[in-house]
Amino acid sequence: MSDRIRTLGVIPARYASTRLPAKPLVDLVGKPMIQRVYEQARKAKSLDRVAVATDDERIASVVRAFGGTAIMTSPEIRSGTDRMAAVAEQIPADLYVNVQGDEPLIDPAMIDQAVQLLVDDPSAQVGTLVRRILSVEDLRNPSVVKVVIERNGHARYFSRSPIPFVRDEPSMERWLARHEFYKHIGLYVFRGAFLRTYVNLPQSKLETAEGLEQLRVIENGYTIRVGVTDLDSVPIDTPQDVERVIRLLRAQAT
């Protein structure tokens, strides 16, 4: 019997979106966004399979039309992680990778790096990536989640506030010049056994306060391994983001 690690990429995709309705089906230079994400994920060397987890037959039909795998999940599910767990009940794997369905430009190397974190660190239940913050705008922005990392590469805390607070520096420009700050990239790798445990844990107080579900992992005493990357992605949340990605795709094609 093979001891090779089986890894499944899961792309959660909901039809409803407050800021951008039917977001997974938005056209990006001739292809729907969900197809762009799927094709990027398929390029990752670490993934054995990729599946879209959706609550809507319109998305599932589009996925099947371009040759992808679509798994129907309950519309009552609210988080991407819970949707991943629903897929895990149908497709067995050792590792499950949550690939955000609104990042059509994600670099496959980011997925491979995140998976390798759990391959290399048996003590960690979750792996994720961060990137160094280089602008005061990102440091101030509560939508950019900050991370404090321990020396052993494990996440100590995630926050929407700038952390750590630098008491003796007069400005955030000086903070960035003299200290390292990291932003979280929303790419997660879960061990299969822990994924089933995680979705049965109650929401934690820190998770509720910050609005960050990864804090449930830390607050319950589990470990998140962090990898630092120089790569970045461009998530789509607004019509302006759509136009930006279209420009980038057209630039890549020239």
Image: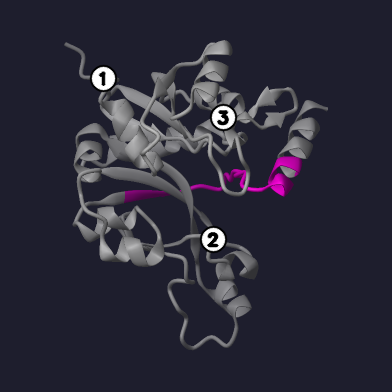
| In the depicted structure, whether residue 171 falls above or below residue 224 | below
Numbered-mark total: 3
Residue position for label 1: 4
Are the residues at dot 3 and dot 2 in contact (C-beta closer than 8 Å)?
Answer: no
Look at the image and tell me whether residue 44 can be seen: yes
Residue position for label 3: 37
| In the depicted structure, whether residue 218 falls above or below residue 190 | below
Look at the image and tell me whether residue 116 can be seen: no
Alpha carbon separation for disc pair 1 and 2: 38 Å
Check residue 143 in the rendering and tell me which mark sits there, or answer none.
2
Q: Would residue 175 be found to the left or right of residue 207 on screen?
A: right
Alpha carbon separation for disc pair 1 and 3: 26 Å
Alpha carbon separation for disc pair 3 and 2: 22 Å
Image spot of residue 32 (x, y percent) = 65, 26
At a point 57% along the width and 12% down the height, the residue shown is: 65
At a point 48% along the width and 27% down the height, the residue shown is: 56
Q: Residues within 10 Å of mark 2 (few under 14, many from 20)?
A: few
Are the residues at dot 1 and dot 3 in contact (C-beta closer than 8 Å)?
Answer: no
In depth, the one of 157 and 86 nearer the eye is 86
Check residue 45 in the rendering and tell me which mark sits there, or answer none.
none
At a point 57% along the width and 48% down the height, the residue shown is: 18
Q: Quadrant of residue 94?
A: top left
Q: Residues within 10 Å of mark 1 (few under 14, many from 20)?
A: few
Mark closer to the chain start, 1 or 2: 1
Q: Which residues are magenta?
A: 225-243
What kind of residue is marked 1?
Arg
Q: Which structural element holds mark 1?
A: loop
In depth, the one of 186 and 176 nearer the eye is 186
Q: Which structural element holds mark 2?
A: loop
